[in-house]
């Protein structure tokens, strides 16, 4: 088991931003104006806001890639504003869009970069590289010697996260790290980050312009106006159900109840069993399973136990008994850390109304179907309705008490 998963990794650190500002010469208005924020150790905080609001500038001031014009930054109570910025950055993981890997270095060399700079022994660096690759779901034997150009976009991003975590920093800064990959890969990378954070408990500050991503990943979300003024800093649930003002409501957008699907994970609902066969099973065995089972369909797994094809009873007959031509390829899967929004999207695309759930290596775990997801949606909508009723009741009581107090005040006058 990886060292981080055993609980021996460095835990997160508190971050305090105090009156942090950034001014650029020639511009009368600050890019970031007097931002104060407290981030708890081990939580994931998302900075979200419109383009140009200063969210990336705020993030980069934490590791002083951009020097603050004024204000203080404290990490675990230590003022880092006057610390050597190079030493500071070695203690803070940093992951960006398009991974930022050095193209002339192998995967292993990229991951080993910061541990080597901080003076780790060679043997420890080598072990750490393998550990990090395993942690982000890449086989060390397969990826150790590859160059970034030989990787897919999603694999590059995984290596970028592995490099950011390699020196075991308590803080991880992420600047739109999944913005340049396709939607399906992005969903899986988000799931992977949730799984990693569940094991590692780092303090993560994550910049995005995508509010759905913010809901999915964040323990708390800071919705930022121009110059990084904080419009609301709260939990995803609180922002969805009680936005602070019209600006936040506009950023949340329509369908707040459905956006709550991003707050529930697949692991929190029933993952059902489904009959499976292997590509190595004899054809007659597969025929018998299809004829004798309660289902008129099977899920065929590849040699690594990953979902490969959906097989129906008529498929083998129409394909004249050939497995190569039979069935329908599995185009989408979800992990246990995927949201119900991800699962619902996958189910709606699939004509049979279900999606396979997989583990970190892509291995088959079970299925989630439309009925399960619709029941969850109905439960959420009912919970929202009850909350709204309680909120109206509280407001009516408050108005009633104010009216009584005003009447008593008038009588007393």
Image (cartoon, helix red, strand yellow):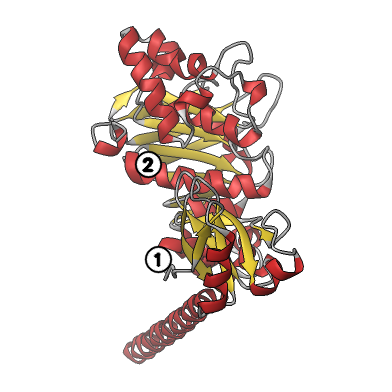
Secondary structure found at label 2: strand
The answer to which of 81 and 5 lies nearer the viewer is 5
310 to the left or right of 119:
right
Nearest the eye: 168 or 79? 168
Q: Earlier in the sequence, mark 2 or mark 1?
A: 2
Answer yes or no: is residue 408 visible.
Answer: yes
Q: Residue at x 31, y 40 (%)?
A: 41
- Residue at the spot 30% in from the left edge and 34% down from the top edge: 4
Q: Quadrant of residue 82?
A: top left
Indicate left or right for 112 with 289 as reference: left
- How many labels sit on residues? 2
Q: CA distance from mark 2 to mark 1?
A: 30 Å
From the top left corner, tell me how far across and down residue 54 is, in percent.
61, 36
User: In the figure, 277 relative to 374: above or below?
Assistant: above
Q: Position of residue 166 (x, y in %)?
A: 40, 23
Residue on which the image places disc 2 = 38
Residue 268, how many percent across, how many down?
40, 65
Residue 229 drawn at (x, y percent) = 55, 44
Q: Label 1 belongs to which residue?
A: 268
In what quadrant of the picture does the C terminus appear? bottom left
Left or right of 196 on screen, residue 355: right
Q: Quadrant of residue 112?
A: top left
Q: Secondary structure at mark 1?
A: helix
Q: Residue at x 74, y 64 (%)?
A: 320
Q: Quadrant of the N terminus?
A: top left
Please tell me whether residue 205 is drawn above or below residue 399 in the rendered image.
above
Visible residue check, residue 257: no
Q: Residue at x 67, y 22 (%)?
A: 149
**Few, some or many C-alpha atoms within 10 Å of disc 1 (few <14, some 14-19, many ≥20)?**
few
């Amino acid at each position: 088991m990886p060292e981080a998963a055993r609980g021996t990794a460095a835990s997160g650190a508190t971050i305090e931003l105090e009156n942090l500002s950034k001014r650029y010469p020639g511009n009368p208005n600050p890019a970031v104006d007097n931002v104060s924020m407290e981030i708890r150790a081990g939580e994931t905080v998302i900075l979200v806001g419109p383009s140009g609001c200063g969210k990336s500038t705020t993030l980069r001031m934490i590791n002083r890639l951009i020097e603050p014009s004024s204000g203080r930054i404290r990490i675990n109570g230590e003022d880092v504003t006057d610390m050597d910025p190079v030493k500071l950055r070695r203690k803070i993981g940093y992951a960006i869009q398009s991974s930022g890997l050095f193209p002339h270095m192998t995967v292993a060399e990229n991951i080993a970069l910061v541990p080597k700079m901080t003076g780790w022994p060679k043997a420890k660096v080598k072990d750490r590289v393998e550990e990090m690759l395993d942690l982000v779901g890449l086989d060390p034997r397969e990826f150790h010697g590859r160059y970034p150009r030989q990787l897919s976009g999603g694999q590059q991003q995984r290596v970028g996260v592995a490099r950011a975590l390699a020196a075991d920093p308590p803080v991880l800064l992420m600047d739109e790290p999944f913005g340049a990959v396709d939607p399906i890969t992005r969903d899986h990378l988000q799931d992977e980050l949730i799984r990693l954070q569940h094991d590692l408990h780092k303090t993560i500050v994550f910049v995005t312009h995508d509010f759905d991503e913010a809901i999915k990943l964040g323990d708390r979300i800071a919705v930022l106006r121009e110059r990084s003024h904080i419009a609301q800093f709260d939990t995803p649930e609180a922002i969805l159900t009680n936005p602070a003002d019209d600006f936040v409501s506009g950023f949340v957008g329509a369908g707040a109840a459905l956006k709550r699907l991003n707050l529930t994970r697949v692991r929190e609902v029933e993952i059902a069993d489904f009959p499976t066969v292997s590509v190595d099973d004899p054809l007659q065995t597969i025929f018998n399973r299809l004829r004798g089972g309660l289902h008129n369909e099977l899920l065929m797994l590849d040699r690594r136990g990953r979902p490969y094809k959906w097989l129906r009873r008529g498929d083998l007959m129409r394909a004249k008994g050939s497995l190569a031509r039979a069935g329908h390829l599995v185009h989408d899967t979800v992990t246990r850390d995927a949201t119900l929004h991800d699962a619902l999207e996958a189910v709606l695309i699939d004509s049979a109304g279900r999606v396979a759930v997989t583990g970190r290596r892509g291995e088959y775990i079970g299925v989630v179907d439309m009925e399960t997801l619709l029941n969850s949606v109905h439960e959420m909508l009912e919970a929202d309705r009850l909350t709204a009723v309680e909120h109206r009741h509280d407001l009516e009581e408050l108005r009633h008490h104010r009216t009584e107090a005003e009447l008593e005040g008038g009588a007393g006058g």
